[in-house]
Amino acid sequence: MKIVQNRKEWRHITVMRLIETLKVDANIAIEEAKKLEKYVFQNDFIVEIQNEEQKVALENLIKSLKRD
């Protein structure tokens, strides 16, 4: 996995893509980006998955954290 540190840039790109693809206004796009940030960032880092094995490992980790 590659760790990319630039939350501000990620947020900007995400908001712009949401505006373009979903045809929503900026306020809605910003709120949606904030929701997504909860899932992709940990201490201002974003993890970039580089292959299927890493994707499965991350999914399993997330599932294990959700167990009650």
Image (spheres, rainbow, N blue to C red):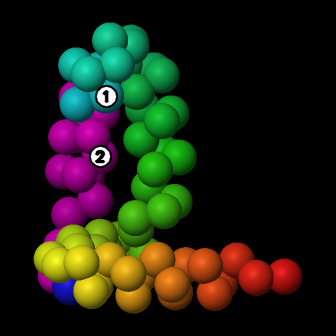
Q: Nearer the viewer, residue 18 or 51?
A: 51
Mark before the other along the chain sequence, 2 or 1? 2
In what quadrant of the picture does the C terminus appear?
A: bottom right
In which image quadrant can residue 24 be found? top left
Disc 2 residue type (three-letter): Arg
Does residue 3 show up? Answer: no
Q: Where residue 11 is drawn, which disc sits there?
A: 2
| Residue 19 relative to residue 24: left or right | left
- Please tell me whether mark 2 sits on a helix, a strand or a loop: helix
In which image quadrant can residue 37 be found? bottom left
- Please tell me whether mark 1 sits on a helix, a strand or a loop: helix
The dominant secondary structure in magenta is helix
Whether the magenta-drawn stretch holds residue 4 is answered as yes
Please give the name of the residue rendered at 46% of the width and 50% of the height, measured from the top-left corner.
36
Q: Are marks 2 and 1 in contact (CB under 8 Å)?
A: no
Q: At which x and y percent is residue 39?
A: 48, 62
Q: Which residue is mark 1?
A: 18
Please give the name of the residue rendered at 22% of the width and 19% of the height, measured from the top-left corner.
20
Task: Name above or below for residue 63 compared with residue 37.
Answer: below
Task: Name above or below for residue 48 compared with residue 7.
Answer: below
Disc 1 residue type (three-letter): Leu
The local crowd at label 2, few if under 14, some if 14 to 19, many if 20 or more residues have their Cα within 10 Å, is some
Q: For marks 2 and 1, give the one nearer the viewer.
A: 1
The local crowd at label 1, few if under 14, some if 14 to 19, many if 20 or more residues have their Cα within 10 Å, is some
Q: Where residue 34 is drawn, which disc sits there?
A: none
Q: Nearer the viewer, residue 8 or 25?
A: 25
Task: Name above or below for residue 16 compared with residue 45.
Answer: above
Q: Which residues are magenta?
A: 2-16
Q: At which x and y percent is residue 65?
A: 65, 84
